[in-house]
Amino acid sequence: MNDYVEVRITASPCQEFITDLLAQMLADAGYESFVADEEGLTAYIPSGLYDEEVLKSLLDQFPLEVSTTFSATTIEGRDWNAEWERHYFQPILIGGEVAIHSSFHTDIPPARYDIVIDPKMAFGTGHHATTSLMVEGLLSLPLEGASVIDMGTGTGILALVAAMRGASKVVGIEIDPGAYQNACGNVAINHHQEIELYNGDAGLLQELRDYDVLLANINRNIITADIAAYGAALRRGGTMLLSGFYTEDVDIVASAAAKEGLVFETMTQRDNWACLRLKKE
């Protein structure tokens, strides 16, 4: 098996959208898996592809005002996907009804909705507070026969929950090519090929109108920039669930939504992360 280089990047300030962008840039440079935390990101790349100068250049070109430092350690060859899953991805039960696990797990909690995911690029395993909040929000909605859009679908967890709960039409949109491919694989292994997945951004919403539910678990800046497109895709009386931002950003997001006729209904929060439910007037 090939050796890998483990690169530890600390970022200041550090927020989820910063580590997401770092992971996306590193993926384009050949890095294969990522583990984000409150202080930065740990990334892994085959040792033959590691180039310190390329990494330095990439960090120097980071488009946000963020200070970064890094260190690199060579790790002897192993089945790294299995190693990552064993240490970082454990089965999880959300809302008492949704179990999320990999195909190799045996200690799976019994649940009404069972989701198998293969998080090749570590884009969302259900463990992050925002994913749990969004799943819980979906569990509270009447989805039988509903039409649903999942913006930034990632590993496809939210789209799968919607389909399993009886939504008649589910569309997932993902801008990152690696995450999009991962979502396609996860939709297939869960036997929900009726979910329509697209690689793109909010521009794709121009062709989608009068949906019952729109989901966006991304980050504050993208949500506020694209909120008009989100609102236009919803029918009157439709529901929007938004997360991926901190509780202190709720007023900013709610204000941007209100300008598009989206009325605040409820908010849930966990670990300083927020989830808003809005209704289109």
Image (spheres, rainbow, N blue to C red):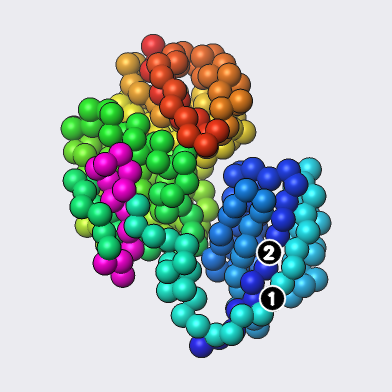
Numbered circle sitting on residue 8: 2
Residue drawn at x 55%, y 33% as measured from the top left? 272
Q: Left of 13 or right of it: where is 41?
A: left
**Residue in front for this viewpoint, 219 or 209:** 219
Numbered circles on residues, count: 2
Where does residue 147 sit, x and y in percent of width and height?
27, 33
Q: Quadrant of residue 118?
A: bottom left
Q: CA distance from mark 1 to mark 2?
A: 8 Å
Picture layout, residue 217 above or below residue 21: above
Mark 1, residues whose alpha carbon is within 10 Å: few (<14), some, or many (≥20)? few
Q: Is residue 47 visible?
A: yes
Residue type for callout 1:
Thr
Q: Left of 58 or right of it: where is 27?
A: left
Residue type for callout 2:
Arg
SS state under label 1: strand
Q: Left of 233 or right of it: where is 220?
A: right
Residue drawn at x 40%, y 16% as measured from the top left? 265
Q: Quadrant of residue 8?
A: bottom right
Residues at discs 1 and 2 in contact (Cβ within 8 Å): yes
**Residue in front for this viewpoint, 233 or 79:** 79
Looking at the image, the residue that sits furthest to the bottom is: 1
Where does residue 46 sit, x and y in percent of width and height?
60, 78
Where does residue 90 sit, x and y in percent of width and height?
39, 60
User: Counting residues from the N terminus, which is met first, the one under dot 1 or under dot 2?
Assistant: 2
Residue drawn at x 31%, y 48% as measured from the top left? 93
Picture layout, residue 49 above or below residue 43: below
Where does residue 144 sit, x and y in percent of width and height?
18, 32
Picture layout, residue 154 above or below residue 57: above
Magenta stretch: give its range: 93-106
* Residue 190 in magenta stretch: no
The residue to which callout 1 is attached is 73
